[in-house]
Image: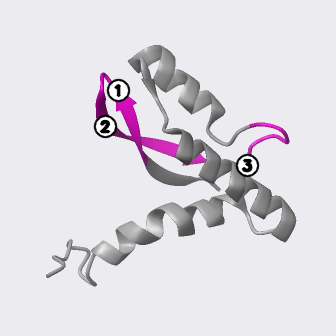
Amino acid sequence: MTTKIVVPCVVGGQISPFDFFIGKPADGSQPIQFQAKWIGSAKQGSVPPHIIKALDDLQKISRETGVSLEELCDLAFNQKDDEKKGEDGEETKNE
């Protein structure tokens, strides 16, 4: 199983969203190591350090609790997006 998260990366001095796919990384590997490397080489961009740290923290929690990294990432990164949408899937406005 993989889960998709959207990461705001810095490319050309601007923030651009990129899809990242989280699976089960090898022990000792950063969860988006290869995807972040691609952003750097292909787009001359970077993943913000706080995103890398958050993924490292989630990976550690996953190992300690037995909850899959994919599930933790889905909860941490995608829950906010789900809260913005109504039952019909349309974005709602906060007033």
Give the Cα distance between marks 3 and 2: 27 Å
User: Three-letter amino acid code at disc 3?
Assistant: Lys
Find residue 24 and name its label: 3
Q: Which residues are magenta?
A: 7-29
Q: Quadrant of residue 91?
A: bottom left
- Do the CB atoms of the residues marked 1 and 2 lie less than 8 Å apart? yes
Hey, what amino acid is under mark 1?
Val
Q: Callout 2: 10 Å neighbours few (<14), some, many (20+)?
A: some
Q: Which residue is mark 1?
A: 11
19 over 91 or under it: above or below: above
Residue 23 visible in rendering: no
Residue located 50% across and 43% down the image:
20
Image position of 59 with respect to 35: above or below: below
Q: Which residue position holds label 2? A: 15
Residue at figure coordinates x 35%, y 77% from the top left: 83
In whole angstroms, how far apart are the C-alphas of marks 3 and 1? 27 Å
Q: 93 left or right of 34?
A: left
Q: x, y (%) of residue 92? A: 19, 77
Q: Against 55, is 70 above or below?
A: below
In this picture, residue 42 sits left or right of residue 58: left
Disc 3 is placed on an element classified as loop
Q: Residue at x 31, y 37 (%)?
A: 16
- Which numbered disc flags the more N-terminal residue, 3 or 1? 1
